[in-house]
Image (cartoon, rainbow, N blue to C red):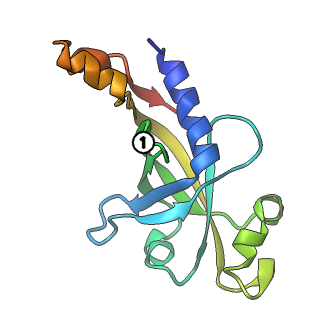
Amino acid sequence: MPSQAEIADKFWKAVKSDRTMMVGLAGIDDSLGQPMTAQLDGDKDGGPIYFFTSKETDLAQDLGARHRATAHFAAKGHDLFAAVDGVLFPDDDRATIDRLWSPFVAAWFEGGKDDPKLQLLRFEPERAQIWLNDHSLFAGVKMLLGHDPKDAYADKTADVRLS
């Protein structure tokens, strides 16, 4: 049974690998979330999480100077799910933009790093609820043999502080 720290470690590894998160602003009715490509700065686990977007998106326009936000994540294999709470704010640090810049990001901005629409967002995660999903053939067989599936999930969740 994995510890809380091991579950958090699995989360960071999955974000580094799969990178798509649904990001929305707390308390704004029409901000249910939009898919964004998460980028971590360096090899260390932990935040912040960065997103490139356009200043013309609803998210960037509703954001203001900073705002509470939630990011939802599902690993590609559906073996891990997370809801992450934190603070989102614009970050215009050119050194960070240079480090995170890639051909994938460049494809979205005709003016490159100097495109007037370019907006880097910085998400400072504070807390996450993380679920590991052991849904497999083996888990199904165990359930058929009378094992309670709730028992298997009892130690597969974590409510962790990320800040």
> In x, y percent, where is residue 32?
32, 65
Question: What residue type is disc 1 on?
Answer: His
* Residue displayed at 38% across by 64% down: 33
Tell me the quarter of the image containing the C terminus. Answer: top right
* Residue displayed at 43% across by 74% down: 62
For residue 149, side relative to residue 7 (left or right)? left
> In x, y percent, where is residue 46?
62, 37
Counting other residues with Cα less than 10 Å from the Cα at mark 1, is it few (<14), some (14-19), or many (20 or more)? few
**32 w.r.t. 157: above or below:** below
> In x, y percent, where is residue 57?
49, 80
- Nearest the eye: 49 or 146: 146
Residue located beneath label 1 in the image: 78
For residue 23, side relative to residue 89 (left or right)? left
**81 w.r.t. 148: above or below:** below
- To which quarter of the image does residue 26 belong? bottom left
Tell me the quarter of the image containing the N terminus. Answer: top left
> In x, y percent, where is residue 19?
58, 52
- Nearest the eye: 104 or 120: 104
Please state the total of marks drawn on the protein image: 1
- To which quarter of the image does residue 13 belong? top right
**123 w.r.t. 121: above or below:** above
- For mark 1, give the secondary structure: loop
Residue, far left: 146
For residue 149, side relative to residue 116 (left or right)? left
* Residue displayed at 63% across by 56% down: 50
- To which quarter of the image does residue 23 belong? bottom left
* Residue displayed at 38% across by 22% down: 156
